[in-house]
Image (cartoon, coloured by chain):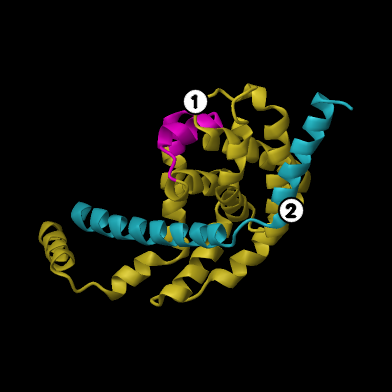
Amino acid sequence: MSDPDPRQELVEHLPAMRAFAISLTRNPAVADDMVQDTVVKAWTSFDKFETGSNMRAWLFTILRNTYYSSRRKTKREVADIDGTHTEALAEKPAHDGRLQMTDFRAAFAQLNDEQREALLLVGASGFSYEEAAEMCGVPVGTMKSRTGRGRQKLAELMQLDEEDALEMTDDATLSVLTATKATTF
Amino acid sequence: MIMAQSGAQQKHDRIIEENLKRVYDEAIEEGVPDRFRMLLEALKQEEQSKASPK
């Protein structure tokens, strides 16, 4: 009678939707509720999906809209959580991978939603800047600067600069130091 | 300083990218709770019963 329901494809995107939601909210229970809302919305408004376009991008767009509308209600709560993270962070740079990932999580939690979202869409989920910009309804330049500032803030919070300082033995660094000295005098 | 900065920058970006992917992949590997399969099943049932009432 009809073609197989394209909505069958929804299930394939669930793991990525959950990963995005969990990374964005840092709260699996909230993330699962968000994904559930998104699935229901997508199912019931599937006629708005353009056949042949990127279904994952469409689903992620609904997902992020769900997040931003629920965030308005819980903003104060989230701000408090972030406040407690700030204190726990000021520690030595990480050399061990495990430790570094713990630092990364703590640092990532301190980014603002827009930066976290940008890095998740472009850095982790594999969307292009153009796709991510369209999903968030912002110009490509804005998306690029969000990822740029997000990376910069992460590097600061993870104290990656201090880690570099400990490793200042390579030739490039030495030659730069010499060059700087030469121009100063 | 430009050379050193861009070198460090690249290294930072790589560290960040690796961690980002690891965090994301960990969440993907968790798998999807059954409630989502049940939800999709329920949505399908609901629609079918609407489309072809007995």
Left or right of A161, for residue A133: right
Residue A57 visible in image:
yes
Percent position (x, y) of residue A174?
Answer: 15, 68
Total number of numbered discs in the rendering: 2
Toward the right, the furthest residue is B54
Q: Is residue B12 above or below residue B38?
A: below
User: Bounds of the magenta span?
Assistant: A126-143
Residue B32's label in the rendered image is none
**What's the chain of the residue with tag 1?**
A
Q: Position of residue A89 (x, y in %)?
A: 55, 69
Question: At which x and y percent is residue A181?
Answer: 14, 63
The yellow-coloured chain is labelled A
Q: Image point 75% across, 49% down: which residue?
A: B38
Measuring from the top left, give residue B52's x and y in whole percent: 82, 25
> Taken as a whole, is the magenta stretch helix, strand or loop?
helix
Few, some or many C-alpha atoms within 10 Å of disc 1 (few <14, some 14-19, many ≥20)? few
Q: Are marks 2 and 1 on the same chain?
A: no
Q: Which residue is mark 1?
A: A52
Whether the magenta-drawn stretch holds residue A141 is answered as: yes
Helix, strand or loop at mark 1? loop
Q: Which mark is residue B35?
A: 2
